Structure formats: structure tokens, C-alpha cells
Amino acid sequence: MARRTPVALVIAIVAFAAAPSSAAQGDGGRVRDGACFYRDTNFRGQSFCVEAGNEVDNVAPDVNDRISSIRVFGGAAVRVYKDSRFRGDSRRFDSDVRDLHGEGFDDAISSIRIERRSSGGGYRPSFGSQNPETIVRRAYQDILERDPDPVGMRVYRSHLIDDGWTEQQVREDLRRSPEYRERSTMTRTRAEEIVRQAYLRVLNREPDAGSQGYVDAVFRRKMTQQDVERELRNSSEFRGRNR
């Protein structure tokens, strides 16, 4: 059964370390099966490690959207998500990634799952032993923001038990549903609310007229709230408030 690892526990187990390159090469001793995440490319800078079978649903503020390289150890595979609580675009890696820029995930990771690969070469999800109903209910709540209806529960429970589906396959199928497409269709009003939430979260204020550039980026270029928050943290206003 997967263990949802509080970020504080991860930090307590593996302290952040601004390590030089030679020291970073020794990080394999930190976890036998799992992965380590670094703020800089080529496994440099502050780092933390997570053992296989664990997940981090909200990466600590120190490293949220600031991870640039990953080392994978033992029989582990990493799935990273651009948004917290395993939402947004995701990618799975089963080997080291020296520079996440080429993968489209540089400074863009907000939640993490560490899976174990099976002896047959495939993947055994770290959450595969959980109750199927729990998996389906969690997927519905995260993707559609509601509990599953009886038909949906029956269909996806069958996929998990009879067809060997993983939780990720359930989630991907839900994202292809008409209900999700309707909910995720971007409108200007929705883009304005995304920008508003980013301003409130980062700058603790309502957006001003200058925020319209972000609204356009969300509406036309599919910029996410995480992207807007990252841009705001790089603004002179934010830097001035945190000196």
C-alpha cells in the first residue's frame, strides 16, 4: 500500500543539501529503491529523496516548481505532476534525468509518486494493493471533483480488478470523458479567476489592470495557475516584499 508521505517527513528523513557534483554522485546511498530530486541540473543543488512506495501530494515551498534533475535508484520509477495532488500534466521516468528542461518539466513539479517496477519488466503501481473503490473514488474526486456514480464505480472497479488497470489509467480515462472536457474548457471568465487565485496566493492582493497579460496567457496559451504563480514569484513586487 502506498504511503502518502508528508513533506515534513521527507525532509526529516533526508535533509536538503547544497552538494557539489562529487558529493551528488554519492546520493545513491540515500535510498536503495526510490528517487532523489535536485534544484539544479546534473544532480546539483538542494535535494531530497523519496523511497519507492511513497508519494508527495504537495512538494514543499522551498522546492515546489524548482526541481531541475532527478536520479532514480533500484527498481523504482518516478511519476511527476505539474500540479499538486497529482493533477495536471504528468510524466514517468525510470532512469536518471540530468536536465528536465528537455522533458518540459524544468521547474514545474508540484507532486510526486514513486512506483516499483515488477520483476517482469513492467510497472507495479505503488498503490496497487489498495481497495479498488478507494482508487476509483480518489480519481473521481481529483479529476471530476465529485464522488463516482454507481455505474462509474462498477466500470472502473472492473478495469482495475479484471483488466489490470493502474490508477493512472483510470485518471487518464476520466480526463478523456465529455464531463472533464466540458469542465476543463477554458473561458475568459475562468482564466480571470485562475489569475485572481494566483495573485491572492502569491501577492496576497486582488489583481490590477496589469494582470490582463496573464489572463491572456492563461486563456490563449493554456498557462496554468502554477505557471502564473511562478511568474509572480519572479516579479519585483514579490522580491521586494521578501527582502
Image (cartoon, rainbow, N blue to C red):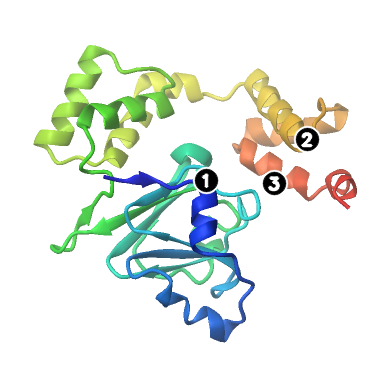
Residue 188 horizontal/vertical position (percent): 66, 21
Q: Secondary structure at mark 3?
A: helix
Residue 223 shows up from this direction: no
Q: Is residue 88 left or right of residue 114?
A: right
Please, which residue is most extreme toward the top here? 150
Q: Which one is closest to the eye, mark 1 or mark 2?
A: 1
The image shows residue 140 at horizontal and vertical percentages of 36, 25
Give neighbour class at mark 3: few <14, some 14-19, many 20+ (Cα, 10 Å): some
**Relative to 213, is 182 above or below?**
above
The CA span between labels 1 and 2 is: 22 Å
The image shows residue 30, relative to residue 238, as above or below, that is below
Within-10-Å neighbours for mark 1: few <14, some 14–19, many 20+: many
Q: Earlier in the sequence, mark 1 or mark 2?
A: 1
Residue nearer the viewer, 193 or 56? 56
The residue that disc 1 covers is 82
At 62% from the left edge and 41% from the top edge, which residue is drawn? 226
Residue at figure coordinates x 23%, y 26% from the top left: 133
Q: In terms of sequence position, does the residue under pointer 1 or pointer 3 come before the other?
A: 1
Residue 68 in which image quadrant: bottom right
* Residue under label 2: 213
> Is 123 placed above or below 200 here?
below
Residue at 41%, 48% (x, y): give it: 55
Q: Give the residue at the far left of this rendering.
A: 162
Q: Which mark is residue 230?
A: 3
Other-residue count near label 2 (Cα within 10 Å), few / some / many at <14 / 14–19 / ≥20: few
SS at mark 1 in the image: strand
